[in-house]
Amino acid sequence: MKIKYLKAAFRLLLLILSSTAYSQQSFSLKEAVQYGLKNHLTVKNAELEIYAAENTIKQVKVAGLPQISGQFQYTANVIVPTQLIAAKNFNPQAAEGEVTKFKFGVPWGGQAGVGVNQLIFDATWLVGLKAAPVYRELAQRSVTNSKTAVAENVMKAYYSVLVAEERSKILGLNINRLDTLLREIKIMNEKGFVEKLDVDRLQVQRNNLVTETIKVQNLIQLSYGLLKFQMGIKQQESITLKDKLSETDVNLLQLPEYQGVDYGGRIEYSTLMTQRKLTTLDIERIQKTALPKLFFSGSLGAGHSNPRFNPFERWFPSSSLSLGVQIPIYDSGLRKTQIQQQNIALTRIDQSALLLRESFELQATQGIISLKNGLETLKSQKANMELAQEIVRVSKIKYQAGAGTNIEVVNAESSLKEAQTNYFAALYDLLIAKVDLDKAMGKLLVDGQ
């Protein structure tokens, strides 16, 4: 019996461990971006537009295929219509003006048949077929646009977590260093070498660091929540990050050689160019409404007439074939007005494209300047942080040797905390500037993402 309970407990432990392993996911930056591109609802909704576009294309295609319809109707003429007709039609000797009542129809009638319609030539339909791949391309551009936004948001959220975690580590090291100093000062106070006020000042400094650590931990939790949202992961799931910030990675963020903006790499521009294609095709479609349309129709059926109810007798077959031509003659200037309207839209697109190109160049210039400033700021803040660490070390030695004051140590710790805060703020700004520059250069999505 005991073995049975042990086996059950072992199975339960395996279930818990497997559940934990499943819910705990770890991502590198690249994996986080790829996950977001596949799972974020914004991307999924954009992908639905591709299916919608394919359905629209199918509708255009089937419009030119044979259309077959069938119909059946059985009618009870409750009151057969009565008409008056001159009596002379039946009796030449009838008086002038005399009429005879005549019922047209019988109480029971019906119709049944099958008809087919086939478009033979319609220039506007041919233009629609030409526009089909362009329409598909526009839907795909919408997906790429959504993916670009998701990739940008995931990268920025990922970097936010990394910077916050590094800042938390540094704060932990500061607290450990201050705890060591605080223990030493307490011992010196107990021996009468320093005042209780010196201990209290360091304790206040430590309390501030603990409060700052709690704030950073809350920021990390919030940053993880934002990252999960941008990736399309449920908030209750737990994730960890594979990548860590290192000195080497930061040093790799150097200014790229400027070779101009790849306009085609900017999804806003390529989408606008696709819209231009559709507008051009729409102008062609309107122009070709002036051409005749040729169509064929045929029908095969039977009609039923009976003075009594019996739908199985007295059916009379009928059939017809028709070849029709629809020739536009005069449209009151509608076609000309529509073409003028589309030409205005085309001009607007061309001007928007020029404006986009100018804005891309400006964004690229701003991105390079921001990255350059970020590199210089980070270099300066790193030097400040190293200098502040040295000041803390020297102040501590002087104080322990009796050549310095407790105020110098507290001020040095405060300056170090401020320098560290400025360093991580500069680091985050630099990483974000790199993301913005990649977006401006049209290189945010790489490796086929």
Image: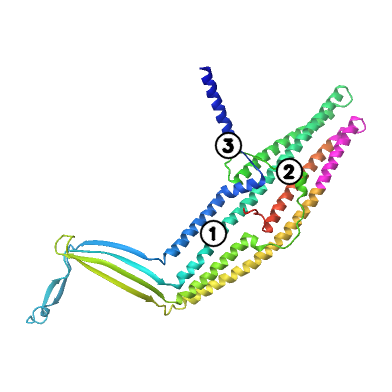
Helix, strand or loop for disc 2:
loop
Sequence-earlier tag: 1 or 2: 1
Q: Is residue 391 magenta?
A: yes
**In the image, which is nearer the foreground, mark 2 or mark 3?**
3
Instruction: Name the residue tied to disc 2.
Output: 245
Q: Amino acid at mark 3?
A: Tyr
Residue at which label 3 appears: 22
Instruction: Give how far apart the Cα atoms at labels 1 and 2 are.
Output: 38 Å
Local crowd size for mark 1, using a 10 Å CA cut-off: few (<14), some (14–19), many (≥20)? many
User: What residue did someone put label 1 on?
Assistant: 139
Q: Residue at x 62, y 42 (%)?
A: 225
Q: Is residue 407 magenta?
A: yes
Amino acid under label 2? Leu
Q: Identify residue type, mark 1.
A: Ala
Of badges 1 and 3, the one in the foreground is 3
Q: Secondary structure at mark 1?
A: helix
**Does label 1 or label 3 sit earlier along the sequence?**
3
Q: Residue at x 80, y 52 (%)?
A: 376
Magenta-drawn stretch, dominant element (helix, strand or loop): helix
37 w.r.t. 242: above or below: below
Does the CB distance between marks 1 and 3 fall below 8 Å?
A: no
